[in-house]
Image (tube, rainbow, N blue to C red):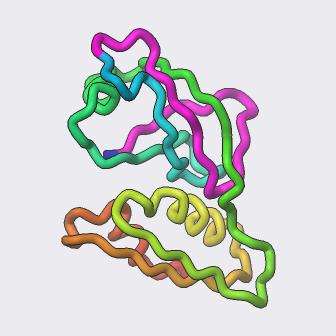
Amino acid sequence: MTFHFQKPTGWRFKPGRYVDMTLLDPSETDSEGNVRSLSIASGPHEVTLMVATRMRDTAFKRELKKMPLGSQVKINGPLGCFTLHCDTLRPAVFLAGGIGITPFRSMIVSAARERLANRIVLFYSNRRPEDSAFLQELQEDRK
């Protein structure tokens, strides 16, 4: 499931990074708490900050799913250093499974938009095509 948030004014990030998201005043919580690290699935050029997650039965994800439009969350980040390398002579080979596609989606859509010379090869595995986040978008010809 994808979730879209308004970006804070002037907020910037490099594709491949993540945020720590805190739910504010949730109606329920569990032993894992109210904070999760979520990869940013959107590219920096996209209007919203998009994250995606597999919807397991946890208090955090139940709360996230039922939040009304316009709800606020606390975002800490961007964090991490998992970004596309700058060596255009060396291919970038991405290996993703399941919802682990999210940082790669950010890098791929950004590289395509910026028309980077990097050659990107993506290996993406899931049990079933219908369980594959962003599959149709990733299969589009971006030449």
The image shows residue 92, relative to residue 29, as above or below, that is below
Horizontal and vertical percent for residue 14?
71, 53
In the picture provided, is 75 more to the left or to the right than 12?
A: left
Res. 121 image quadrant: bottom right
Residue drawn 44% across the image and 21% down it: 23
Given the current orientation, which residue lies at the most extreme bottom position? 89
Residue 26 lies within the magenta run: yes
- Residue placed most toward the observer, 123 or 3: 123
Horizontal and vertical percent for residue 66?
26, 24
Residue drawn 71% across the image and 55% down it: 81
Query: What number of labels is visible?
Result: 0
Horizontal and vertical percent for residue 130?
20, 66
The image shows residue 106, relative to residue 50, as above or below, that is below
Horizontal and vertical percent for residue 52?
40, 47
Residue drawn 53% across the image and 78% down it: 142
The image shows residue 120, relative to residue 108, as above or below, that is below
In the picture provided, is 27 more to the left or to the right than 35?
A: left
Q: Which residues are magenta?
A: 2-28
- Residue placed most toward the observer, 18 or 115: 18
Residue drawn 65% across the image and 56% down it: 15
Given the current orientation, which residue lies at the most extreme front position? 31
Q: Give the position of the C terminus as an image quadrant.
A: bottom right
The image shows residue 136, relative to residue 121, as above or below, that is above
Residue 41 lies within the magenta run: no
